[in-house]
Image (cartoon, rainbow, N blue to C red):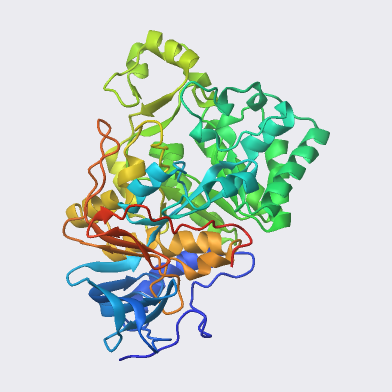
């Protein structure tokens, strides 16, 4: 048995977060990958006694240490107690021969904060699903509503749009993307178009500061959905984020508000001027064919000391609510241009008449039209996090990404296309998102790893069969190939099936350790 120190035993890895920035670690990952010994992550601390569970003989892949070797993994009291070449005993065992044992996937962009969506994500290998883009408001009330009903871990930022709705209308927006059918979405509120004066901006920042104190994981911005938000308002919100040490998770302005590069430049300049940490959501859909240029900008900013990260999902179509401000600039287009829109859950493509009708009705559309060559290039970039942007499945199946994102990357882009290595793909799903969050939520320093002392959030999958089955015609088809999923040591998936009646998911908040 090989014994080395693990998490919590004095070792500082090259990727351990500092108090204010993760920036240089993102560029170091390629150099670390090239020189790290496969044995450098081999640990077996705390293996005394009999473990609750031992995962036997799997191919253990830990992207932080680059360990890639056949090992046994022991679990007790929700933590990993040993990663060893043998010699550990457990009351229960999993035979992982021929399977990959990896950290559970961490989704930074999961709108589907409900049990139905969480079970589909569990079958896709996800153990932590966070709502970081739009966020929630108020935070504490939302966290309390989910406790005891979550198969996987959950958490959210404090919502800038939600706090704005509260300020202007006095209404608590809650989790705006979970609006039931027939009820008006907060995206329809005139609050998103209202311009705020300096006093109101200060009051808005006070509301968001309260949300951070309640456990919000940062500030979530949907700037394209709040066209009334001036550049001054957004800048002041970045100042708040910096003062609180909270990351800003941002959906940038729409293309009609200064162009694609201008929208990226706004938030990068705000991060530079204030010192706020910045995460730009779904770079693929925000940048489209300018992705190479925008990623060059992001990397250049990182090289110059800005704590900035980004993400993408592995699909050429996006999705959002048709009544939102994002579609304001779509008025007066041709039927051919409207045909890019698909009414969710149906094969119907829109035209000018149906676009206007559905805008009045409200609901979700799928937006087709991006280039697969560019999509694959983005997926292959080692410093672009994988995140689903998954739409809730509670009321209807809308887009396949909430069910198939992670298996699609591993099955299609890694195994079938060879666009990136398995280790690099796993890093984009585990250690990189963990590092993005752990500076503000210390509990995440124990996630995204298969190391002694880490939380036992573990996925066991078959690298030869893992694949997505969800499609635009059948968005809720579960993925195949995830054989076991542990959430703090509790099996949520066993032998490829959801374990019924099990809800071990815990809230991830800024105060969680």
In the picture as drawn, the residue positioned furthest to the front comes out as 501
Q: Residue 431 at what x, y percent from top left?
A: 43, 65
Where residue 432 appears, as percent x and y from the top left, is 45, 62
In this picture, residue 277 sits left or right of residue 360: right
- Is residue 112 found left or right of 495 in the rendered image? right
Res. 401 image quadrant: top left
Percent position of residue 127, x then y:
40, 58
Residue 388 in sight here: no
Q: Position of residue 330 (x, y in %)?
A: 47, 18
As drawn, the residue found furthest toward the right would be 199
Q: Is residue 56 above or below residue 154?
A: below
The quarter holding residue 2 reads bottom left
Number of labels in the image equals: 0
Q: Nearer the viewer, residue 313 or 188?
A: 188
Q: Residue at x 70, y 33 (%)?
A: 166
Question: In the image, what residue occupies the spot 49% across and 70% down?
Answer: 446
Residue 167 relative to residue 51: left or right: right
Quadrant housing the N terminus: bottom left
Residue 370 as seen in the image, left or right of residue 210: left
């Amino acid at each position: 048995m090989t014994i080395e120190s693990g998490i919590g035993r004095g070792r500082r890895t090259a990727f351990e977060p500092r108090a204010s920035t993760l920036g240089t670690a993102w560029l170091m990952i390629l150099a670390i990958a090239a020189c790290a010994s496969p044995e450098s992550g081999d640990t077996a601390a705390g293996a005394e006694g009999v473990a609750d569970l031992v995962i036997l003989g799997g191919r253990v892949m830990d992207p932080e240490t680059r360990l890639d070797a056949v090992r046994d993994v022991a679990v007790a009291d929700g933590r990993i107690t040993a990663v060893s070449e043998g010699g550990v005993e457990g009351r229960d065992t999993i035979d992982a021969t021929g399977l990959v044992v990896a950290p559970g996937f961490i989704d930074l962009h999961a709108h589907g904060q409900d049990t139905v969506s969480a079970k589909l994500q569990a079958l896709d290998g996800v153990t932590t699903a966070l709502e970081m883009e739009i966020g929630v408001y108020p935070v504490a009330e939302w966290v309390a509503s989910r406790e005891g009903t979550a198969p996987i871990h959950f958490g959210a930022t404090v919502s800038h749009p939600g706090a704005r709705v509260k300020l202007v209308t006095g209404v608590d927006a809650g989790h705006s993307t979970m609006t039931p059918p027939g009820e008006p979405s907060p995206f329809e509120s005139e609050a998103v178009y209202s311009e705020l004066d300096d006093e109101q901006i200060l009051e808005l920042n006070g509301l968001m500061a309260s949300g951070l104190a309640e456990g919000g994981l940062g500030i979530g911005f949907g700037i394209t959905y709040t066209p009334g938000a001036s550049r001054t308002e957004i800048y002041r919100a970045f100042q708040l984020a910096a003062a609180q040490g909270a990351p800003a998770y941002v959906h940038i302005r729409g293309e009609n508000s200064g162009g694609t590069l201008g929208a990226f430049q706004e938030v990068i300049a705000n991060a530079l001027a204030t010192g706020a940490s910045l995460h730009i959501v779904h770079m693929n859909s925000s940048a489209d064919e300018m992705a190479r240029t925008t990623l060059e900008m992001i990397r250049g900013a990182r090289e110059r000391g800005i704590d900035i990260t980004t993400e993408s999902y592995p699909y050429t179509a996006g999705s959002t609510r048709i009544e939102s401000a994002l579609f304001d600039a779509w008025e007066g287009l041709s039927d051919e241009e409207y045909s890019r829109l698909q009414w969710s859950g149906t094969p119907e493509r829109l035209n000018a008449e149906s676009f206007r009708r559905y805008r009045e009705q409200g609901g979700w559309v799928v937006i087709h039209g991006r280039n697969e060559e560019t999509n694959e290039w983005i997926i292959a970039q080692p410093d672009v996090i994988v995140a689903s942007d998954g739409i809730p499945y509670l009321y209807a199946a809308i887009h396949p990404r909430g069910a198939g994102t992670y298996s699609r990357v591993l099955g299609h882009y890694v195994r079938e296309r060879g666009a990136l290595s398995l280790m690099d793909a796993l890093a984009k799903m585990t250690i990189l998102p963990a590092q993005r969050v752990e500076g503000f939520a210390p509990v995440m320093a124990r996630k995204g790893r298969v190391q002694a002392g880490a939380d036992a959030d573990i996925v066991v999958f078959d690298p030869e069969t893992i694949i997505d089955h969800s499609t635009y015609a059948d968005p809720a088809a579960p993925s195949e190939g995830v054989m076991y999923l542990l959430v703090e040591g509790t099996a949520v998936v066993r032998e490829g099936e959801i374990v019924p009646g099990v809800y071990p998911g815990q809230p991830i908040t800024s105060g969680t350790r």
